[in-house]
């Protein structure tokens, strides 16, 4: 950092699971999974500057829901693991403008941590490879490695096996014909979901199929068709998600310009999404969801189909 007074600003994008299939539970407690993931132009904002001591400043719509203990925050854990790997990171003040709903299935905390890894690697010229960054990120959260990306990926394993989906591959796969599009409306029933509780319900009531196809299948359209198999479990213990989905389905325009055939849940919830072919339709739908009393934003993906 050549200018100690310089302030650096970064976007930590929301992560959307366009589909999510959970497989068997492994001996280490993690589940095998397969998911097609996209990142949006909407997200949290991180501001980084030098300081006399490490400081974490929280602000924004959802900041009250974050643990203010710096040692427990994933952003501060990311800084510490870089230091533990002998990278000279001076004391920093990091401000998180929290716009992504907490416990909302949009990877807010993981994206904040991943953005911290990327930002500090750039600011301090650490020259850490993406593979090594991913290895460090995995040590503090299974969902963080995928958030090191800013484009569509397919995620497998426990979230650590990541393959970039190029525009050409997306086109060849027929995903565009399936109805995926550039504009997306996110919505949340103003609820915080416990991922642990959703997975416990899933393990209790779901017959887990063999995960081999999750790890090996290249049929992305089949994966999308299966949707999110955590959704049923989440709806059982968080019925407000079902109310939101029903509202979205009722308000969704029927003019053929919607994306997926029906709105669905992202991750373990509570946030849901709908896809649109044009910005105007997406904005109008978002406004209707807000009028119904829900949190909602209209945005677009960071990479086009």
Image (cartoon, rainbow, N blue to C red):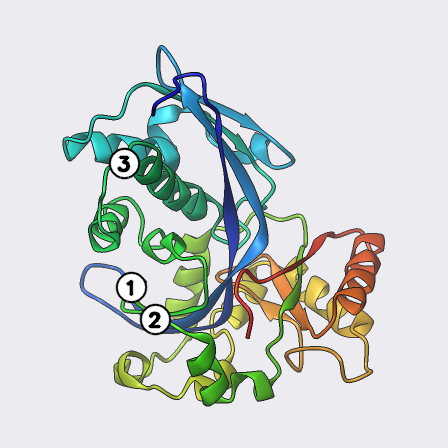
Q: Which residue is mark 1?
A: 158
> Number of labelled discs?
3
Residue that appears at 47% across and 76% down: 167
Residue located 18% across and 64% down the image: 27
Q: Residues within 10 Å of mark 3 (few under 14, many from 20)?
A: few
Left or right side of 174 for 300: right
Counting residues from the start of the chain, the first of labels 3 and 2 encountered is: 2
Question: What's the residue at 54%, 44% (across, down)?
Answer: 102
Above or below, comparing residue 257 to residue 33 in the picture: below
CA distance for labels 2 and 1 = 6 Å
The percent position of residue 305, horizontal first and vertical second, equals 55, 75
Q: Quadrant of the N terminus?
A: top left
Pointer 3 and pointer 2: residues touching (CB < 8 Å)? Answer: no
Identify the secondary structure beneath mark 2: strand
Residue at label 3?
Answer: 125
User: x%, y% of residue 236?
Assistant: 56, 66
Specify the quadrant of the image occupied by residue 29.
bottom left
Q: Earlier in the sequence, mark 2 or mark 1?
A: 2
Task: Find residue 25 and report its image quarter.
Answer: bottom left
């Amino acid at each position: 950092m050549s200018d100690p007074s310089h302030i650096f600003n970064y976007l930590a994008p929301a992560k959307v699971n366009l589909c999510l299939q959970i497989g068997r539970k492994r001996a280490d407690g993690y589940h095998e999974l397969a998911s097609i993931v996209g990142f949006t132009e909407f997200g949290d904002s991180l501001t980084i500057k030098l300081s006399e001591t490490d400081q974490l400043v929280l602000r924004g719509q959802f900041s009250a829901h974050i643990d203010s203990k710096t040692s427990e925050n994933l952003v501060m854990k990311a800084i510490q693991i870089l230091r533990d790997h002998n990278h000279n990171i001076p004391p920093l003040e990091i401000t998180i403008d929290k716009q992504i709903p907490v416990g909302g299935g949009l990877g807010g905390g993981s994206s904040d941590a991943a953005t911290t890894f990327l930002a500090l690697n750039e600011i301090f010229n650490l020259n850490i490879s993406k593979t090594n960054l991913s290895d460090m990120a995995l040590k503090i959260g299974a969902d963080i490695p995928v958030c090191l990306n800013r484009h569509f990926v397919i995620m497998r394993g426990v979230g650590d096996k990541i393959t970039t989906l190029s525009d050409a591959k997306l086109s060849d796969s027929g995903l565009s014909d399936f109805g995926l599009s550039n504009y997306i409306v996110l919505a949340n029933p103003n609820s915080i979901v416990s991922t642990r509780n959703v997975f416990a319900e899933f393990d209790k009531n779901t017959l887990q199929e063999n995960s081999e196809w999750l790890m090996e299948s290249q049929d992305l359209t089949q994966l999308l068709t299966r949707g999110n198999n955590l959704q049923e479990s989440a709806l059982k213990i968080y019925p407000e998600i079902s109310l939101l989905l029903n509202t979205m389905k009722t308000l969704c325009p029927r003019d053929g310009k919607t994306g997926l055939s029906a709105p669905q849940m992202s991750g373990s919830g509570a946030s849901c999404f709908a896809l649109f072919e044009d910005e105007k339709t997406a904005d109008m739908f978002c406004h209707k969801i807000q009028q119904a009393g829900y949190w909602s934003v209209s945005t677009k993906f960071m990479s086009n189909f």
